[in-house]
Amino acid sequence: MAFIDYYKILGISKNATEADIKKAYRKLARKYHPDLNPNDKAAEKKFKEINEANEVLSNPENRKKYDAYGEHWQHAEAYEAAKQQQQKQRQGQGQQTYYQGSGDFSENDFSEFFENMFGHARDPRSGSSVKFRGQDFNAELQLDLKDVYSTHKRTLTVNNKNIRITIPAGVENGQVIKIKGHGGKGLNGGPNGDLYIQFAITNTSKFKRDRDNLYTTVDLDLYKAILGGELMVNTFDGKVKLNIKPETKNGAQIKLKGKGFPKYKKEGQFGDLYITFTIKLPEKLNEKEKTLFKELSKLR
């Protein structure tokens, strides 16, 4: 396997912080996303490389293994276990060679170790092949709030594989879901790892989300606020007609039950929508309007 420099792929140094990695990944992911580069094979390949690099470097434990073992990072634990076993065997044979770290291996020892581990790894206690669980993968999926208002399917490209997943309505920003068995392939018949997807949800709507509830403000003209009447307002999935009570105050809030956001994995259940009224004063009054307001002020 050829060595893949994940730092170079993301354009960062080996001393990059977690924030640096996240920033670099998001910038490149947006640039090379398939939706923005349709039918561009080069961009698609670059997008896959970027995701693979992020899967490794964004996870502190995986990054540590990668820095130590390069392309063999997924088998770091097996490497250490085999190294310790080899050390015990050498000690048992009376040899005076001791291994205190990966840097003590000679080139021949290193090659022989990987040949044995990947080709003929065996459990010294039973003689049977050692089975290693595949590495877990981590990916970030960027969506808009409107994308998670309803349950839908989406195809993701992870580690050069297309995976079709169902995204439940009501997923929250930062939430992580597990796709079992879609991580790295197991070794010697071991089980595959899992895929963990973290959602990065942006909100371009006029609604503020707080879990299952939504909040918004609606302008109300002075006359309707004083006299009352009917008003059409936007909800997240359409319009509704409201009856405005006479003498509605600025900042008054009403609740529309069941007009909020879907509840995660609770089919047909929704939070509430809270509307706050902002009274707008009339502008550029003509002379007649000013006269009427003066008369009204005298009556009060």
Image (cartoon, grey):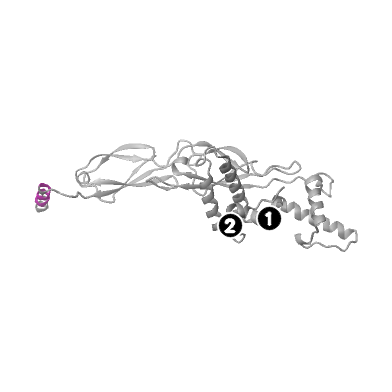
Q: Residue 7, image x and y in percent?
A: 61, 55
Q: Residue 27, image x and y in percent?
A: 51, 51
Assess whether mark 2 and mark 1 are in contact (beta carbons under 8 angstroms): no
State the CA–CA distance, disc 1 to disc 2: 18 Å
Q: Is residue 203 left or right of residue 234?
A: right
Q: Which residue lies under the disc numbered 1?
A: 65
Q: Is residue 293 magenta?
A: yes
Q: Which residue is drawn at the image coordinates 19% and 45% (left, top)?
A: 223
Q: Which residue is drawn at the image coordinates 69% and 54% (left, top)?
A: 70
Main secondary structure of the magenta stretch = helix
Q: Secondary structure at mark 2?
A: loop
Q: Is residue 277 left or right of residue 21?
A: left
Asked whether 86 or 8 is in front, the reply is 8
On residue 75, which mark appears?
none
Q: How many marks?
A: 2
Q: Which residue is drawn at the image coordinates 49% and 48% (left, top)?
A: 173
Three-letter residue code for mark 1: Lys
Three-letter residue code for mark 2: Ile
Q: Is residue 196 magenta?
A: no
Stretch of the chain drawn in magenta = 288-295
- Quarter of the rendering containing residue 155: top right
Asked whether 181 or 268 is in front, the reply is 181
The reply to whether residue 199 is visible in this rendering is no
Q: Secondary structure at mark 1?
A: helix
Asked whether 28 or 163 is in front, the reply is 28
Q: Which residue lies under the disc numbered 2?
A: 12
The reply to whether residue 173 is visible in this rendering is yes
Asked whether 197 or 287 is in front, the reply is 287
Q: Would you call the spot at circle 2 few (<14 residues within 10 Å), some (14-19), or many (20 or more)? A: some
Q: Which mark lies nearer to you, 1 or 2?
A: 2
Q: Which residue is drawn at the image coordinates 72% and 53% (left, top)?
A: 76
Ranked by sequence position, the earlier of labels 1 and 2 is: 2
